[in-house]
Image: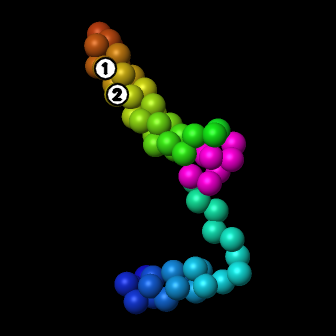
Amino acid sequence: MNNTKIIIYLKLALSSQKTIYYANDWAIETMKNARYPLELFQRVVTVSLETMKIVNALPRLDI
C-alpha cells in the first residue's frame, strides 16, 4: 500500500460513521487509568529483559 492509498484510507475511516475506539478510551473506561497501555507495555519490556538476564546467567547445556 503506498502513501496515497494510506491517506485516502485514513480519511475514509475518520469520516465514516463508525466509532473509532482508542486504547486510551478503553483504559479510562475499564482501568480508570489513561496511562495503562503505556504502563502495561513497560511491564512487558521489563519482564522480557529480566527473563533474558536469567536465561543468559544459566549454565550452558552440553548435549
Looking at the image, which is closer to me, 40 or 5?
40
Residue drawn where x is 36% and y is 22% of the image: 50
Looking at the image, which is closer to me, 30 or 10?
30
Q: Position of residue 25 (x, y in %)?
A: 62, 54
Q: Is residue 47 magenta?
A: no
Q: Position of residue 60 (x, y in %)?
A: 28, 14
User: Could you tell me the amino acid type at mark 1?
Assistant: Lys
Residue 19 in view of the camera: yes
Residue 62 in view of the camera: no
Residue placed under numbered mark 2 in the picture = 49
For disc 2, the neighbor class at 10 Å (few under 14, some 14 to 19, many from 20) is: few
Residue 50 sits above or below residue 13 on the image: above
Residue that protrudes farthest toward the top in the picture: 59
For disc 1, the neighbor class at 10 Å (few under 14, some 14 to 19, many from 20) is: few
Residue placed under numbered mark 1 in the picture = 53
What is the chief secondary structure element of the magenta stretch? helix
Residue drawn where x is 64% and y is 51% of the image: 26
Q: Where does the N terminus fall, quadrant-wise?
A: bottom left
Q: Which residues are drawn in magenta?
A: 24-30
Q: CA distance from mark 1 to mark 2?
A: 6 Å
Relative horizontal placement of residue 8, taking residue 4 as reference (left or right): right
Q: Secondary structure at mark 2?
A: helix
User: Could you tell me the amino acid type at mark 2?
Assistant: Leu
Residue 21 sits above or below residue 59 on the image: below
Q: Where does the C terminus fall, quadrant-wise?
A: top left
What's the mark number on residue 8? Answer: none
Q: Is residue 27 magenta?
A: yes
Residue 24 sits above or below residue 44 on the image: below
Looking at the image, which is closer to me, 60 or 27?
27
Residues marked 1 and 2 touching at CB (< 8 Å): yes
